Amino acid sequence: MEIITDIHSLRSRLKSEHYVVFVPTMGNLHEGHLSLIRIAKQKSGCLVASIFVNRLQFGQNEDFDKYPRTLVDDLKLLENYGANIVFVPTEKDIYPVQQEFIIEPLPLANILEGEFRPGFFRGVTTLVLKLFNIVRPQLVLFGKKDYQQLCIMREMVHQLNLSIEIGEGETVRASDGLALSSRNRFLNNEERIEAAHLFKVLSEIKEAIESGEQNFRKLQDIAKETLNNRGWDIDYISVRKIHTLEIAKCHDQKLVVLGAAKLGTTRLIDNLEITVRK
Ligand code: PAF
């Protein structure tokens, strides 16, 4: 596995590659990332992963410095899982001057996560477009755990005419259902046990809708009340149409329920897709 830290070397190294599969990450890799690496490995091409903690997507109250940096372990994992190249740029490489040209994403970026993390998706799309321009991949993989991010990436590639295919990986969960996330390490023992309840309430909404319940608002309210009573601080629990993430109507058949809530100081997000059979 080659570790490349500057843009120029990466570009010259990739010149001879015909098919590049790319997995962008912020490091602190867990089974969720590794499942994307596994999917990427099944494609015959050059597998490039990147590790870069992107300051631009952190809000003022979000702790960029606290984000876990575990480069040595990450590199070992990527080597074991067969990555060909890991791109580990410095902040100076990616943002040599103040970033004044910004990808201003769609209205989709201002709802749900965007409402509670203003500027977050702008930071993600601006960085990811830069990475696309540097790596020039044919296929890029994102996890469904960050469902809204995945939808925005698909729409960015479409609206900016990038000839890149966006692939997806299923959310990887612990045995109690908790979606794997770098943030889980901030949960204390008690919170870690409680954390599975976000998945539980989303599962209950999914089951109810798949069994014919059409009153989404009632289901959302019950879920919020349940979590509230258990000490969570909820940002949203919302049933949406897949892809566009518009508010779901009762005749829609392909839905997703998304949730974000804080347990202590740790903010967790999760989602489940729902298929209504008529
Ligand atoms: O999903 C992430 O880890 C990040 O948002 C990404 C896509 C690597 C951009 O920094």
Image (tube, grey):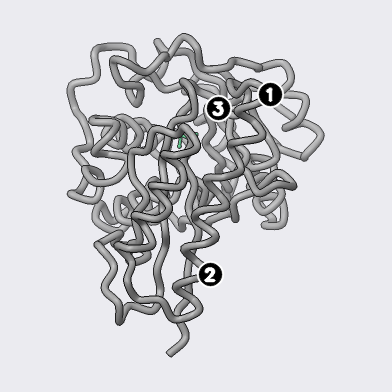
Distance from mark 2 CB to nearest ligand 1 atom below 8 Å: no
Is residue 211 placed above or below 244 in the rendered structure? below
Q: Amino acid at mark 2?
A: Glu
Find the residue positioned furthest to the right: 80
| Residue beneath the point at 39% across and 47% down | 225
Residue behind mark 1: 189
Tell me how far mark 1 sits from mark 2, CA to CA: 29 Å
Find the residue positioned furthest to the bottom: 278
> Going from the N terminus, do you reach mark 1 or mark 3 first?
3
Query: Element at badge 1?
Result: helix
Q: Residues within 10 Å of mark 1 (few under 14, many from 20)?
A: few
Kindly identify which numbered label has been placed on residue 207. 2
Q: Residues within 10 Å of mark 2 (few under 14, many from 20)?
A: some
Is residue 38 placed above or below 99 in the rendered structure? below
Q: What is the number of callouts on the image?
A: 3
> Going from the N terminus, do you reach mark 1 or mark 2 first?
1
Q: Residue 205 at what x, y percent from top left?
A: 47, 63
Tell me how far mark 2 sits from mark 3, CA to CA: 27 Å
Q: Residue 182 at what x, y percent from top left?
A: 58, 29
Residue behind mark 3: 183
Tags 1 and 3 in contact by the CB under 8 Å rule?
no
Q: Amino acid at mark 3?
A: Arg
Q: Amino acid at mark 1?
A: Asn
Is residue 210 placed above or below 123 in the rendered structure? below
Q: Nearer the viewer, residue 218 or 99?
A: 218
| Residue beneath the point at 33% across and 53% down | 157
